[in-house]
Amino acid sequence: MKSCHSQNRKFLLSSIALIVILDATRNTAWKLARETGDYSNVAIFGFATDPAGVPLEQKKGDPLPGNAFISTTSVEISEAPAGTQRRYLDATAIPYVVLPSYMRGRVKDAAVAAVWRPKTNALAFAIFGDTGGHFDEGSVRLQQDLGGHPLVEINHIVRAKARIEDIILVVIFPQQPVRPRVDSEDWLSEIRMAGRSAFEAWGGIARLESCR
């Protein structure tokens, strides 16, 4: 997930992802923007905004209605209502990898991937779900599927801070997407089925071993 850059940021773990909560009033520019409705002097990253640049709050039916902003991902769930948190990927339920922005278009949205951790021989299946600056990012669920423990509690707030430090190999099938679904469990089952099928047809672990 992307986050707002602020020295005073706080994060809250919801059923969707890690989201910046609305009471970060210690930041002067942020406090002024909240009071005036003018966000032109605040840099906002990874949150849905209206045409005036005002960040959108979660609505009824979202995990934290009225208490958190809508945190976005590059890949959207088209069958979910626009302007809701449900429109975007659930980082705690859907395993996904983050790719550099320039790869968007070369890789179809929600294209399946196989992710292997040689140290433990853990194999997970994921999708392309978001864009960022590096190749070394993935969702909370993906790290957990690989045996990682990304969530740590700091000052009574749960954050995704811990990393997997050993080698991870990722095989992306850029032209083989799995249609985003509102039901995370159904979608996860389809991701795993399509990912395994594509990976085995490609050559599986035996072929991936040759890349080490």
Image: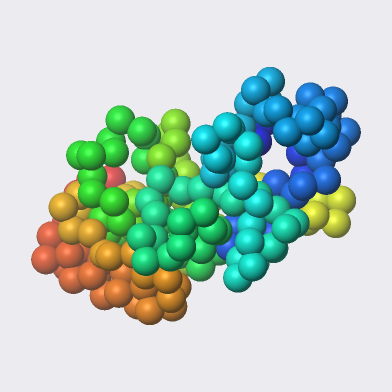
> Tag count in the figure?
0
Residue 90 vs 171, above or below: the answer is below
In-front residue for pair 142/146: 142
Structure colour scheme: rainbow
User: Can you see residue 145?
Assistant: yes
Q: Residue at x 44, y 31 (%)?
A: 133
Residue 210: x, y in percent? 19, 49
Nearer to the camera, 170 or 210: 170
Identify the residue shown where x is 43% and y is 65%: 80
Residue 154 location in percent, x, y? 81, 51
- Residue 209, percent from left and from top: 24, 54
Residue 56 rendering spot, x and y as whole percentages:
61, 47
Name the residue rendered at 38%, 51% in the picture. 75
Frontmost residue, 48 versus 5? 48
27 and 121: which one is in front? 27
Residue 124 appears in the picture as rendered: no
**Where 207 sits versus 79, above or below?**
above
Instruction: Name which residue lies at 78% across and 30% down.
Output: 36
- Picture quadrant of residue 178: bottom left
* Residue 123 located left or right of residue 14: left
**In the rendered view of the protein, which quadrant contains the C terminus?**
top left
Instruction: Give the left or right position of residue 17, taking residue 157 as reference.
Output: left
Residue 126, placed above or below residue 19 = below
